[in-house]
Amino acid sequence: MEYTVRKIQSPPTNDFDWHAWDVAETAELTFFSKPCDIRPRIQLRLLHDADHIYGFYRVEDCYTLARHSGYASEVWKDSCVEFFFHPAGAGGYFNLEMNAGGSHLMQFVRNPRRRPDGFQDFTRIPPEHGTKVSVHTTLPQTFEELPGPTTWMLQFTLPIETLQPYCKVPTPLDGQRWTANFYHCADDSSHPRWMTWAPLTPTNFHAPQFFQPLLF
């Protein structure tokens, strides 16, 4: 498996027009790391310019919820899409997690071995850096679980400058080879689910050994 992030000359619009991103490859999350009685359809498109990565998730969901708001809140408990990526030569990987209401968190993990307070060696990206990532969705910021089918979209802009205090990423991005995985989860849903693009085992998203090539 691999995903090619194609280059654009100007930033895409934040109007949730899926077809405006047709130049991008489409990745689809099809692997369930635990049995689940519903089958959401999760698609992702990525683009880049010299110093930004742009992402667009399209989520055909059920039992969607977003109870947490604000930067670094527990967004993984809500209906959440995630982008984990390891830049070339970095001493760790970043996890960007975004819920259906547009709240997000970001960390840099050097050793993902679990501890009660997080991981063996990691940094919670502070607001002065993490809030430079912009996230927009088609749903309200917070809401209780929606029982019926819901299609929602999320767009994000990730400035490479956000990463530089933790690892030096050369710009422009052209020609670089990273590794990554894409996820969907909803831990506190009445129908919890954990979906991935690249298969992994066991149910642990913090598993960089299963990341696959991300080509710019």
Image (spheres, grey):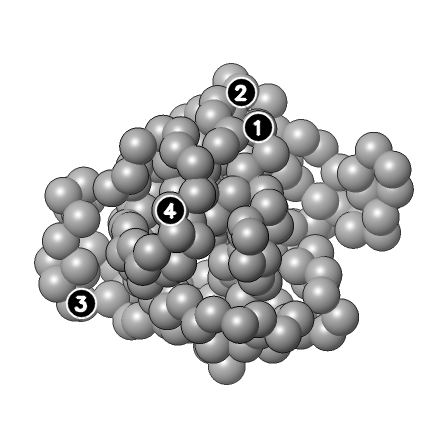
1 vs 4, front mark: 4
Which residue was labeled with disc 4? 146
Which residue was labeled with disc 2? 127
Q: Amino acid at mark 1?
A: Ala
Camera sees residue 150: yes
Above or below, 67 against 214 in this view is above
**Where in the figure is residue 128, as x and y percent of width and height?**
51, 18
C-alpha distance separating marks 3 and 1: 32 Å
Q: Residue 135 is drawn in which quadrant?
A: top left
Q: Which mark is residue 72?
A: 1
Discs 2, 1 touching: Cβ within 8 Å: yes
Q: Secondary structure at mark 3?
A: loop
Discs 3, 2 touching: Cβ within 8 Å: no
- Image point (48%, 23%), residue name: 70
Name the one closer to the observer, 95 or 194: 194
Above or below, 122 against 27 in this view is above
Above or below, 38 against 131 in this view is below
In the rendered image, the quadrant that contains the C terminus is: bottom left
Q: Secondary structure at mark 2?
A: helix
- Image point (72%, 61%), residue name: 204
2 vs 1, front mark: 1
**Where in the figure is residue 193, as x and y percent of width and height?**
57, 61
C-alpha distance separating marks 3 and 4: 32 Å
Q: Secondary structure at mark 4?
A: strand
Q: Secondary structure at mark 1?
A: loop
Above or below, 6 against 118 in this view is below
Of labels 3 and 2, earlier in sequence is 3
